[in-house]
Image: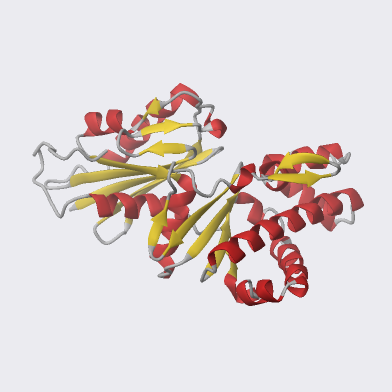
Amino acid sequence: MRYWIGFDIGGTKIAAHLVDEMNDVKWEAHVPVVKGDGLLPALFELVDDALTHIEGEGDLLEGIGLGIPGKIVRETGEIHLATNLNIESPLAIGAPLKERYDTVVALENDVRLGAFGVQNLHGLNDLAYISIGTGLAAGFILNGELYRGQSGLAGEIGHIAEAYNGRSMILENIVSGPGLVQQGLAANCQVASAADLFVLAESGSAPAEKVLQNMFDHLARAIQWIALTFDLEKIILGGGVTHAGPYFETGLRQAVAQLRKQSKITNLLLNDDKLMILPTSANVGLWGATYLVKNSTRPSRRKGERLTSTSI
């Protein structure tokens, strides 16, 4: 039996699983992320744990797929600019994993892999996947292909500068989980998480309601820009903030509806059916990493046969 390991590495946690040829999950783990130079040893430990589940005669680990924040140099397997992981200098991930486990290693930005996972799960050719959690970014599938951009950084919408309460602020600091906490504290709301802010708003806190309404308005405009630029089949949202409170979807759809009223072309390109919020159980980044590495591996090889491919 052939097996693959997928990793979804976020700003707060690592999700991993081991799947077989039928995509049946044989092992899975959800652990807090280890940042900086400790990330690679943590991945070794998880892979070693997964391998204890494929010790049967003829069983073979075909590959490891990873979704990681930041800029990924796929040819070398290095991570650059992963600020949420405390990685500023290039960190080699692909080559050490390949050398240690003698298997194909495929890496990609985590949000772009989220878009790839959505494509494989829903059969879409043109989509944007927006992840709202520790950070904010988008991944795009255009004409059936994952779009990375010239520098491999397409979709970094979190760095768009916005006017907020009379000053300039990047969109990530308005919309992401840590950003919502910062805005909540600035409004004298006693919160430690985005979920706390939603609870306060639901209880009638006017300052919390204002922070969330600002978030909905700014996020809706970003979604409008994406819809007007690419004319997509679907714009799909996932990540922890999308499940922080029961009225996230209601508030966002109301903000988008206001934009539709102001523009006929927005009404055409961003109708209500085009917007989709993923359920809590959907880990599209993890499955995107799995599909990526499965697509990168050749049909079969004998157990013990050394790899000659230069794939990282």
Which sits in the foreground, 110 or 31? 110
Q: Position of residue 273 (x, y in %)?
A: 60, 75
At 43% from the left and 69% from the top, the residue drawn is 124
At 44% from the left and 60% from the top, the residue drawn is 141
Q: Position of residue 291 (x, y in %)?
A: 33, 55
Colour scheme of this structure image? secondary structure
Does any portion of residue 285 appear in the rendered image? no
Say if 239 sits above or below 102 in the image. below
At 69% from the left and 55% from the top, the residue drawn is 219
At 17% from the left and 53% from the top, the residue drawn is 1
Residue 271 horizontal side relative to residue 107, left or right:
right
Residue 139 horizontal side relative to residue 61, left or right:
right
Does any portion of residue 161 appear in the rendered image? yes
| Res 109 quadrant in image | top left
Say if 97 sits above or below 246 in the image. above
Which sits in the foreground, 13 or 223? 223
Viewport quadrant of the C terminus: top left
Could you tell me how many numbered marks the image carries? 0
Residue 244 horizontal side relative to residue 111, left or right:
right
Which sits in the foreground, 138 or 192? 138
| Res 182 quadrant in image | top right
Say if 97 sits above or below 299 in the image. above
Q: Position of residue 302 (x, y in %)?
A: 8, 45
Q: Position of residue 48 (x, y in %)?
A: 30, 34
